[in-house]
Image (cartoon, grey):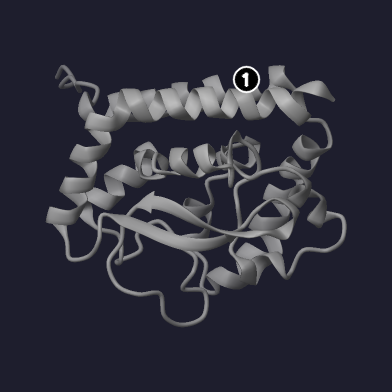
Amino acid sequence: MLYSRFGKRWLDLIAATSGVILLSPFLVVVAIAVRLSSPGPAFFRQIRIGQFGRKFRIFKFRSMVGEPRGRGALLTAAGDPRITTLGRWLRSTKIDELPQLFNVIVGDMSIVGPRPEVPAYVLAYDERQKTVLSVKPGISGISANVREEELMASQTDKEDYYISTIMPAKLEFDIAYSREVRFATDMKILFGAVGSVARRITEILFPPLTTAKET
């Protein structure tokens, strides 16, 4: 299909480059805030699996402190004590994902696509699930609507629950997307993601006023 072979890359370059240019002052402010608010670098980097199984280094604003240790430490559930106060806000608004615009510009990621997974969990994919690796991973995608952090929060064995329940559910969405990449679908996901982020930021900055009940 013409769009998936050529048009999607042009859309990625235009959208990501425009985003970096327009948001650059904001990105600088966030980076400084992260650096000053807790010990550690401004950015979090991690190896993920991209198109055709190639490894790449993903970028995020750092939202946690401490190095991952122990079984399931690669996963983050709601209420994780490693999440900083600022990091909680960055994660809830998805602002922590904005540095991935640079991943899009260099060609490791797309604006829309399956969310990239860490190598350890990709090893658990069956042959059918590996079809998601036929397309570039995205900053946003259909499976991004799965609120995995909240779902894992109450689980004792978070890694087992993620591998057995959450990851297969996410992959079903991503398999359907990777089989038929369309411009209209990408636009729907993109505008939906932008609208969702805008609503979250508005709700946090301007919480609804509560009125006292009449007695």
Q: Where is residue 179 in the image (x, y as percent from the top left)?
A: 84, 37
Image quadrant in which you'd find residue 114? top right
Please name the amino acid that badge 1 sits on.
Answer: Lys
Q: What element carries label 1?
A: helix
- Quarter of the C terminus within the rendering: top left
Question: Can residue 112 be seen here?
Answer: yes
Image quadrant in which you'd find residue 119? bottom right
Task: Depth check: give the residue in front, 202 or 123.
Answer: 123
Q: Which residue is drawn at 24% across and 22% down?
A: 208
158 relative to 40 in the view: left or right: right
Q: Position of residue 20 (x, y in %)?
A: 37, 30
Q: Where is residue 205 in the image (x, y as percent from the top left)?
A: 21, 28
Return the residue found at the far bottom: 70
Q: Position of residue 39 (x, y in %)?
A: 17, 66
Q: Which residue is drawn at 57% across and 60% down?
A: 48
Question: Can residue 204 be seen here?
Answer: no
200 relative to 50 in the view: left or right: left
User: For the image shown, how many numbered marks are present on the structure?
Assistant: 1
Q: Residue at x 82, y 50 (%)?
A: 131
Q: Which residue is drawn at 45% across and 21% down?
A: 195
Task: Depth check: give the residue in front, 186 or 89.
Answer: 186
- The residue under label 1 is 188
134 relative to 51 in the view: left or right: right
Image quadrant in which you'd find residue 92? top left
Task: Depth check: give the residue in front, 163 or 180.
Answer: 180
